[in-house]
């Protein structure tokens, strides 16, 4: 599985959303190969680095101006 997460106007998670994301990560952590995080803020970039410590997937941050590049990276073989 490969994921593209675009954080347009993203301000953070609500506690329930954090819990749901954690449950997803635990259940599918071995099935996720790549995650591209596309953001607009510096804190989103460091959040991506921290998140990468908790998953086995290759996780990369892309600036909002690089969304097309992020999508290509997620899809490439």
Image (cartoon, grey):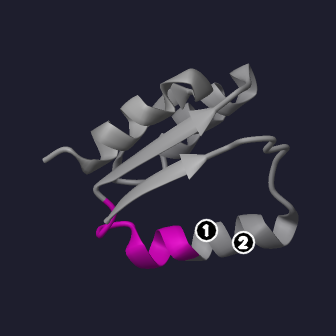
The reply to whether discs 1 and 2 touch (Cβ–Cβ < 8 Å) is yes
**Marks 1 and 2, Cα distance to the nearest angstrom?**
5 Å
Is residue 30 a member of the stretch shown in magenta? yes
Circle 2 residue: 19
Circle 1 residue: 22
> Magenta stretch?
24-32
Which quadrant is home to the N terminus? bottom left
Q: Say if 32 sits above or below 77 in the image.
A: below
Rendered residue at 53%/32% (across/down): 49
- From the viewer's perspective, tell me whether residue 32 is left or right of residue 36: left
Residue 19 is situated, as x and y percent measured from the top left of the image, at 72, 71
Label 1 crowding class (10 Å Cα cut-off): few <14, some 14-19, many 20+? few
Q: Visible in this render: residue 31?
A: yes
Rendered residue at 55%/45% (across/down): 51
Q: Say if 13 sits above or below 30 in the image.
A: above
Q: Say if 1 sits above or below 13 in the image.
A: below
Q: Name the one closer to the observer, 6 or 14.
A: 6
- From the viewer's perspective, tell me whether residue 21 is left or right of residue 12: left
Taking the view exactly as shown, the residue that stands out farthest to the front is 68
Q: Name the one closer to the observer, 4 or 59.
A: 4
């Amino acid at each position: 599985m490969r994921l593209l997460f675009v954080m347009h106007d993203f301000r953070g998670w609500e506690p329930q959303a954090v819990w749901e994301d954690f449950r997803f990560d635990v259940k599918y952590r071995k099935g996720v190969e790549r995650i591209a995080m596309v953001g607009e803020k510096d804190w989103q970039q460091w959040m991506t680095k921290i998140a990468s410590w908790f998953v086995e997937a290759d996780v990369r941050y892309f600036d909002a101006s690089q969304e097309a590049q992020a999508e290509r990276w997620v899809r490439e073989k």
